[in-house]
Every structure is written in C-alpha cells, then in structure tokens.
Image: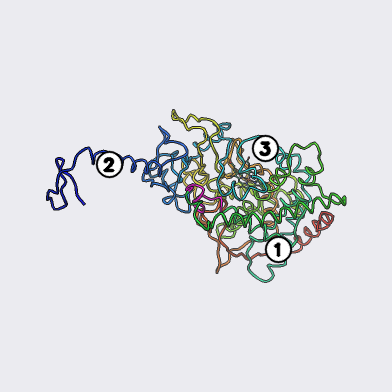
Amino acid sequence: MSLTYEGRAIDFLGYRTGHIDIFVWAPGLAIACTLLYAVYVLLTLTDKPKIQGIYEIPNSLPIVGHLLQLGDDHATVCEKWWRQYKRDVFQIRLGNTRAVVVNSFDACRKMLIGNQSACVDRPTLYTFHGVISSTQGFTIGSSPWDESCKNKRKAAGQTLGRPAMRSYSPMFDLETYCIVRDLVRDSQDGELSIRPYLQRYALNTTLTLCYGIRMDEVYDDLLREVLEVGSAISLLRSASENYQDYIPLLRYLPNNEKTQRGKSLRARRDKYLNQLLDQVRDMIAKGTDKPCVAAAILKDEETKLSGVEVSSICLSLVSGGFETIPGTLTSCIGSLSTPEGQVFQDRAYEGIKRHYPDISQAWEKSLEVEDVPYVNAIAKEAARYYTVSAMSLPRKAHADIDWNGATIPKGTMILINAQAANHEIEHFGPDAGTFNPERWLQGHPPEEIPSTGIQHFSFGAGSRACSGQLIASRLLYTALVRLLASFRIVASESEPPNTDYVDYNQFKSALVAIPRDFKVRLVPRDVEVTARCMKEAEMRTRDAYVE
Ligand code: HEM
C-alpha cells in the first residue's frame, strides 16, 4: 500500500515507488469520499430532517441514533437530558425516526392543549401496525387521525361518557364486591399479592362493557390468556424492545424473532377476540345478550362501523384498562401500606365515615358519586405519582407546529414525557417526588382544592386524551372506598412494596408499567360491617352475573 507525494507514489517508509498521474488517483479518491459520505448520510437519514431551532441531544450514532443511550427507561433518561442540557423540549433520533420530546409541565400543556389540532395524529409502527394489527384493526390509541379513527372515538365516547356511566352501577357493584369477597376469603391464609384481584377487576369491567361477559375466577384461563397476550403485545410497541420499527434493515434478518412473535401473539389474540364476539352473536341469536358495545353495534344496522372497527373498539377498551387500572391501584396500595401510608389510610377511613356514618351507604354511593375528598385525593395522587404510562402514547404532528419560532414539520413524532412533567419540582413543589395525597387537599376537615386546568399528565391531555378517564376515575374511587372501608392494609415485612416512582416498575421498557410483586396483610376494620355490606351487594348484584 502506498501514499502519494508530488504526484509520486511513496510507500509507508517514505521510499518513492514511481510516478502516478494525479488524474488517476484524484477521481478515485473523490468517488471514495462521496461514497463514504453517501453511506454516512444514508445511515443517519431520518424521516424528517433536523429541525432548526430545536436543540438536538448530542452524540447520536449512525443507524441507531439515540436508541442505545435511551436504554430501557426513556422517561428517566429524557428527564435527565432535560436537566443536563437545560432544554425542556429537544429532538432525538430513534434510528431513522426523528422525534421531539416534551418534558416540563408547561411545555406538555402548551404542546397538548395549545396545539390540540396540530398534534391530533398518532404515528404508525412497523411491528404493531403492520404485523400485529393486520387482523383486528388499530386500537383507538394507536390509530392515525382519519375518518375511521373519528368514528371509533365517537362510538367509544358514547360507551365511556357520563350518561352511559350511570347504567354501569351494577357492574361496578359486582366487580368491587368480588374483590372484597375474595380478599376476605384469601387473606385468612396470611399475606397476599393484591394485583391479580385488581387485574380481574379491570378486565371484567371492560369485557362486560364490550361483550357482556365476565369471569368470576381470579385465575380463570381465558382471563389470564387475555392479560398475558395483552402485556406481551404492549411490550412489542415499545421502542426499546423493538428496534426493527426504527431500524428497517433489521426487518429483513432471517428468522426475524420480533415479527414471528408478533404473528404468534396476533393469532392468540384473534382466537380469544373472535371467541368473545361469537359468544355475543350467539347470545343475540338466542335473545340472551346483555347491553354491551358489541351487541349494540352488531344489532344497529345504521352503524357506519365495519366489522374490523367493532373489534378495534372492543380491543381499545380492553387494552385501555387492563394494565393501567391495576398498575395504578396496585402501586397506590403499595404506598398506602407503608407506615407513612397507613396515616393516609386512617385519614381516608375517617373521611369516609364523616361523609357516610353508615359504611354500607358509602359502599352504595361510591357507585354514583365520587364525593369523599380524601379518597379522591388518593386516587389523583396515585395517578400522578405512579405515572403508569410514563411516555404517554406517541403523537404525530398533523400540521406544522410553530414552537417558539422553530417549525416542527407535519409528520414528526412527538413524545410526551408525562413522568417528568408529573414530578417537576418547579410545578409541584419540593415534595414532587413524594407520594402525598394531601397536596390536593385544604382545610379541616379536608376539602379538595378546586381544580383549575390540567392537574397532571397521566391521562394525557387535549384532542387525544384518554377516552376512559371518567370510567378510570370511578374504577379507582369505588375500589378504594370499599377496600379502605373494609381493611387496614399493612405491607409485608419480608416482601414489601417498592414505592419509588421509577423503580416500582419491573418492565421499564413496557408501554404501561407492571409493578414489582409485593405482599400485604389485610387487617379487617369491622368484620360485621363488611359482612353486611357484602351481603347487600350480593343481593343487589345477583342478577348481574353472566356466566
Ligand atoms: C388509570 C387508568 C388509565 C390511564 C393512566 C390511562 C392513560 C392513557 C393515556 C396516557 C392515553 C394517551 C393520551 C394522550 O395521548 O394524550 C390514553 C389513551 C386512551 N385510553 Fe386510557 N388510561 C387509563 C384507563 C383507560 C380505560 C379504563 C380505558 C377504556 C375503558 C381507556 C381508554 C383509552 C383510549 C380508547 C385511549 C385512546 C385515545 C385516543 O387515542 O384518541 N383508558 N390513556
């Protein structure tokens, strides 16, 4: 090998090796440089060019961009970058995708509320949209903003809206009664893990709404299959678990494990969703169907929804609640079971008794109104503190967005760091990183501080905010009233809860947090009163059972 000097070739020891014409090597060198540059450009190419005027996090690599630096826990890393580079909004590269990350409370509010219609869209991902959703359609939360999405949101809005909620009392009654019933039975044997009971609660609620079907056993096979497949699919939506969405080359690898896994999960999901829908068709034919989304839509000939859209709405409701509700409630109970949390429990119990001296009234009224301030404060704090969907659901710019003079072009991915906004000291004060329901209360006896504007970002905000927010609040409230009125919940000494708002989550890469396992001891508040409340609920809900 040789270099050249004054038109002569020289080897590495500096000896001249003969004349080389400049016209021979110069074009070769130019081609090599151009090729190298082209390869570099190709490997750093993004769907949208770098946005002028918005800070880009340094040290991104060819092909992967910032994916490796982001690791599993995108919310925490982005929060750190916000503080380190002193920019609450910045741009990053997820492989070939450019994304704008919004971190502070004010910036999240400005993006989601101030630019409602400009960020109404959602991005599509190769594995989730191309492979997994090819049969049942996109869930509402993953649908791009089009006519079909609007129709689905409208149909879901009717099911999840305030007027419809009034007819759900028997369902809330039954499901929360079943939690207490089974906890009373199972806690006789000592400490227990509360999450499975809350998973059944959330899943039965949405299955009842969608199909008029519920499962009575906490470890029912179908129930566990729905939960297992749902969680596995949610993992495949995460950027850190699924690089092929952002690095297209990976899709063409032989034995593509992610695509195969996506297909197998899709088949398992199709099986149970079709089974549920067939059950509804069967019940309609026999005239035994219960009021539910699927039956209403299947029977309504005026509907503009296609078969895939019906499945997609049901899927949206089932997947909207099955991890978020148990995640929030389980971790909330973890915090309440600690020595500091027990003080909150006692105050909540006093608050319930102050409003309802007869506890069975508290049980019954919890189905209609959320009027015990202390319980509302616990539910709100649980949603804020344990931001179960730490990076919310990704958005996409539907139009150009003017961001302090910079233009975020239409089509750019927008990521909302709800975890960072929800724990911002500048907004929530120095105890932002502490679980403290009393931040939402004032006076003696405590009343809720009247809420103005966005309280936290756990349900998102604006045009694509959580459609299930009302029902989620009722689910959290009713369960909390009945649990706190029945038991004093005490953390296990050998398997205590992890109450760190980041580390409580055992799968940081998942779209929705899965709390680490822990156990609690349940000390009955008043055995006779609870037995009476359960008896009354059992009488009320006897007819609501659907086997
Ligand atoms: C504690 C419980 C829940 C939490 C923390 C939660 C959180 C969220 C978040 C962060 C979003 C994205 C919002 C945005 O982009 O601004 C969302 C969307 C959504 N959620 Fe929830 N959710 C919960 C319960 C539920 C329930 C029970 C249902 C249905 C029964 C539901 C149905 C939906 C739907 C359909 C969307 C998609 C909205 C759209 O894209 O237009 N959620 N949720």
Ligand 1 under 8 Å from disc 1 Cβ: no
Compare residues 203 and 424 and report the one nearer the observer. 203
Give the residue type that dot 2 points to.
Gly
Q: Are marks 2 and 1 in contact (CB under 8 Å)?
A: no
For the magenta stretch, what is the residue range? 236-248
Q: Earlier in the sequence, mark 2 or mark 1?
A: 2
Foreground tag (2 vs 1) = 2
Image-quadrant location for residue 334: bottom right
Foreground tag (3 vs 2) = 2
Q: Residue furthest bottom?
A: 189
Q: Position of residue 446 (x, y in %)?
A: 62, 45
Residue bearing the label numbered 3: 148
Residue bearing the label numbered 1: 221
Verify whether residue 246 appears in magenta: yes
Q: Position of residue 244 (x, y in %)?
A: 50, 50
Foreground tag (1 vs 3) = 3
Q: Earlier in the sequence, mark 1 or mark 3?
A: 3
Q: Position of residue 473 (x, y in %)?
A: 66, 46
